Amino acid sequence: MAKNKQADVVVIGGGAVGTSAAYHLAARGMSVILCEARNIASGASGRCGGQVIHAFARDVNIDKIDYRLKVTRANTEIYKEYQKSFELDFEFRQVGLLDISITEEEFGELERLIEIQRSLGDDEIKLLTKKETLEVMPNLNPDMVSGSRWRESDGNLNPYKLCWAQAVEAQKLGAEILTHTKVEDIVIEKNRVKGVRVKDGIIESEYVVNATNAWSSSLTKGMEVIPVREMAMVTERLPELPPQAFEMLCFGDYAYGATQTASGNYNLGGPAPNYPPDPYDERIYPEEVLRVMSYINTIFPSLEEVSVIRSWVGIMALTPDGMASIGPMPGVEGLFIAVPDGAGMSYAGITGKITAEYICDGKTSIPIDLLNPGRFIGKPKMKWPKPYDITSCHKFICDEESRYKK
């Protein structure tokens, strides 16, 4: 019941970012109530590949690679600290990631991007030839590989377990987690947060953290995100495979793999076609399953007879400029937005820490001016491409980015 409940902070959303914010705020001594409409990790965080990528995507904001590395490297250090102290193991492994090219033309594009990255201080990224790529991941289809970008410190984790690990630690510190408690709206009076309204009443608070990812714009006017349906699946348990995570184009689609979980299941996925008119539709359609299953046969011929035991569709958020929206919402005192763009597992830990720093100290250890969630206010609403998949959206962002910033 929400009647008569009060807290210093209400966090909306029980995914990786919301549970991170609850944990870091509770660790700073704040009284915290987290509201989740369904259950912990029931949204995009529990339906993704779990990749921890320090430099997500290819062309989107490549000029800001130095800033993104500062954020994502800080995130990785937080995960390392988690591993030392958290009760639950969320299977974080720095096993590297291959960004694979499938044509010589695409390989030339990787060369160009690496040159830009290195000029901005990214001295870790490496360009691998076809031979070197297959040495790292020998079960790849050699007919689909022309080379790759490689970063040794990238890796993966179990996203479902990360959410629960953070939630458990937050509860140990006194945070209250209300599942099946949908926030209907954020209560604002005279441009000041007063709490949130749920079915049973109002939870009063001085601060509210909107960590609802693709649903964030429905609760906060001025936010602009596009919901993208992404599909993932896991196979039956398999013998140990080469451990590297990967991303590549397959049949013109963005495909990814987060390698094996500790139980031996292999995770593979890609963008789900926008079959339903509702981009928030989390139902699974046979055509989508068959297409993503075909990735296995194409990318890993040796796994042709492997059974897929589970699949799901998750809804993640992309922003008009391909950057996260993290920071106070202009014009509403006490409202903090915590929405990463696409690469949630690469931002979850640091986003929670930044949220706690800002709310408790009024400043953050990493500058967040570039991530100002109010940067879209007053600008024309973008007409997004269809289908809303990762490939088309990111290409659109690249093509339109300079025009949109004017």
Image: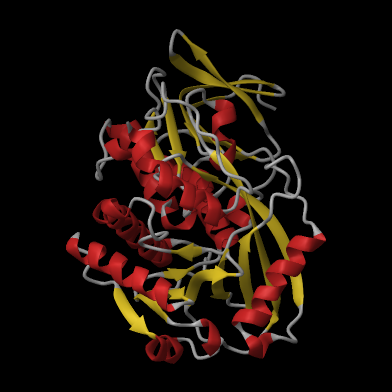
Quadrant in the rendering for residue 265? bottom right
Regarding residue 66, the answer to whether it shows in the image is yes
Asked if 160 appears above or below 20 in the picture, the reply is below
Q: Residue furthest right?
A: 286
Q: Residue at x 51, y 46 (%)?
A: 19
Q: Residue at x 69, y 49 (%)?
A: 274
Give the left or right position of residue 282, taking residue 365 as reference: right
Along the line of sight, the residue nearer the viewer: 284 or 396 = 396
Asked if 220 appears above or below 346 in the picture, the reply is above
Relative image position of residue 389 (x, y in whole percent): 59, 52
Along the line of sight, the residue nearer the viewer: 404 or 329 = 404
User: Quarter of the image containing the C terminus?
Assistant: top left
Relative image position of residue 193 (x, y in whole percent): 47, 18
Along the line of sight, the residue nearer the viewer: 10 or 101 = 101
Give the left or right position of residue 261, taking residue 92 as reference: right
How was the colour assigned to the protein in this rendering?
secondary structure
What number of labels is visible? Answer: 0
Regarding residue 140, the answer to whether it shows in the image is no
User: Quarter of the image containing the N terminus?
Assistant: top right
Relative image position of residue 166 (x, y in whole percent): 50, 53
Give the left or right position of residue 309, taking residue 348 as reference: right
Q: Residue at x 50, y 41 (%)?
A: 174
Relative image position of residue 326 (x, y in whole percent): 39, 38
Asked if 154 appears above or below 315 in the picture, the reply is below
Give the left or right position of residue 209, taking residue 110 as reference: right
Q: Residue furthest top?
A: 190
